[in-house]
Structure formats: structure tokens, C-alpha cells
């Protein structure tokens, strides 16, 4: 397989060519990082999707979210979230409870066991996350942080349009 420098050199560096390259590379990075994170979590018997869902729930919501709110945040279906939530509930990481005002809505509540799990993982997570970005300088991380924020916002808008 050609290395990324060779592939980049073959593009004529028109904007569309660069966008295509970036798109493919983002998917490849996602696939590789998913594999790496899965290996880190195998001893905890947690999948990358369960890991992501817990991160989203802990960081993106001030109050226990509904399954649909988590599905929307993760750009997935209510059914997928329910499957993940059921497995996480079996592990003791969250509770699935009916909403007090509307019994049709299921809310997801993080448990103390989940918070303790994340506290225990912190040193390992720091090492893992740092390794994923080891080739970047501080200034590059700042720029990438800003760029990813813009890409996330655009992707969210396009996702909402596609769902209509």
C-alpha cells in the first residue's frame, strides 16, 4: 500500500482533490482509532460504541437524557441506543427509567459505578489519548481543535437536512 505522502503527491492539490483526500483519511483514522480503542477496552468488556455513548451522556447533558436525545446526539437510531443502554444497564453503568411526566419516554441515568469507572480509567485514558495525537505540535492541536469544531457543526447541519 502506498504511504500517505505518496498518495498526497499524486493529487494535483485542487480543493476538491484535497477534500476527497481528507474525507477518505477521516474514515481511515476513525476505523483505526476504533480498533485501537476497542483493544484498550477489551479487558473492561465495553465496546467502542458503549464507550462513546457513556462519554456523550456524561459530557453533553446536564440532566438525564431520553434515549431519543442520546440517539440524536450520536447520530444514530433510538433502537441502537436502546441496545447499547440495555447492555450498559446490565453492567451497572446506567439505569433506564421512565420519565416522571411522560411515561412513554425512557431516560438514561449514569450510575455512581459508571463515574467510578471513568475515574479509575483516567490515567490510562490520558496515555491513550495522548498517543493518538503524538505526531502533532501544540499549535497544530489548537488548529485541529478549531477545524474539528467547524466540521462537527457542518456535519450536524447536513445530518439534520438529510433526515428530513
Image: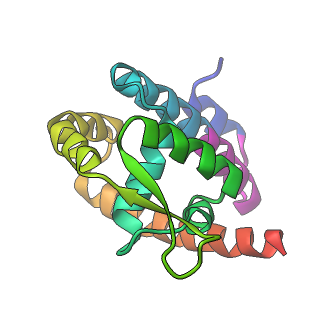
Residue sitting farthest toward the right? 164
Q: Residue 149 location in percent, x, y? A: 47, 69
Magenta-colored stretch includes residue 17? yes
Query: Quarter of the image holding residue 16?
Result: bottom right
Residue 56 in view of the camera: yes
Q: Is residue 23 above or below residue 59?
A: above
In the image shown, does 71 or 23 lie closer to the viewer?
71
Magenta-colored stretch includes residue 16? yes
Tell me which residue sits at (59%, 46%) in the image. 26
Tell me which residue sits at (39%, 35%) in the image. 91
Tell me which residue sits at (54%, 62%) in the image. 70
Q: Residue 60 location in percent, x, y? A: 41, 68
Q: Is residue 18 above or below residue 73?
A: above
Q: Which residues are magenta?
A: 11-27
Q: Is residue 149 left or right of residue 123?
A: right
In the image shown, does 124 or 147 lie closer to the viewer?
124
Please tell me whether the stretch drawn in magenta is mainly helix, strand or loop.
Answer: helix
Q: Is residue 85 left or right of residue 135?
A: right
The C terminus is located in which quarter? bottom right
Tell me which residue sits at (45%, 27%) in the image. 38
Query: Quarter of the image holding residue 42?
Result: top left
In the image shown, does 145 or 122 lie closer to the viewer?
122
Q: Residue 137 location in percent, x, y? A: 26, 50
Amino acid at each position: 500500500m502506498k504511504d500517505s505522502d505518496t498518495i498526497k503527491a499524486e493529487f494535483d492539490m485542487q480543493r476538491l482533490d484535497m477534500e476527497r483526500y481528507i474525507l477518505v483519511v477521516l474514515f481511515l483514522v476513525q476505523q483505526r482509532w476504533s480498533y485501537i480503542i476497542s483493544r484498550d477496552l477489551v479487558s473492561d468488556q465495553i465496546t467502542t460504541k458503549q464507550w462513546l455513548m457513556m462519554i456523550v451522556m456524561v459530557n453533553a447533558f446536564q440532566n438525564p437524557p431520553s434515549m431519543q436525545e442520546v440517539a440524536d446526539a450520536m447520530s444514530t437510531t433510538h433502537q441502537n441506543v436502546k441496545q447499547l443502554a440495555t447492555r450498559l444497564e446490565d453492567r451497572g453503568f446506567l439505569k433506564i427509567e421512565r420519565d416522571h411526566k411522560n411515561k412513554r419516554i425512557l431516560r438514561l441515568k449514569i450510575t455512581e459505578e459508571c463515574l467510578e469507572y471513568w475515574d479509575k480509567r483516567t490515567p490510562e485514558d490520558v496515555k491513550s489519548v495522548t498517543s493518538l495525537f503524538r505526531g502533532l505540535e501544540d499549535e497544530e492541536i489548537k488548529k485541529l481543535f478549531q477545524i474539528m469544531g467547524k466540521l462537527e457543526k457542518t456535519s450536524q447541519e447536513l445530518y439534520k437536512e438529510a433526515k428530513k
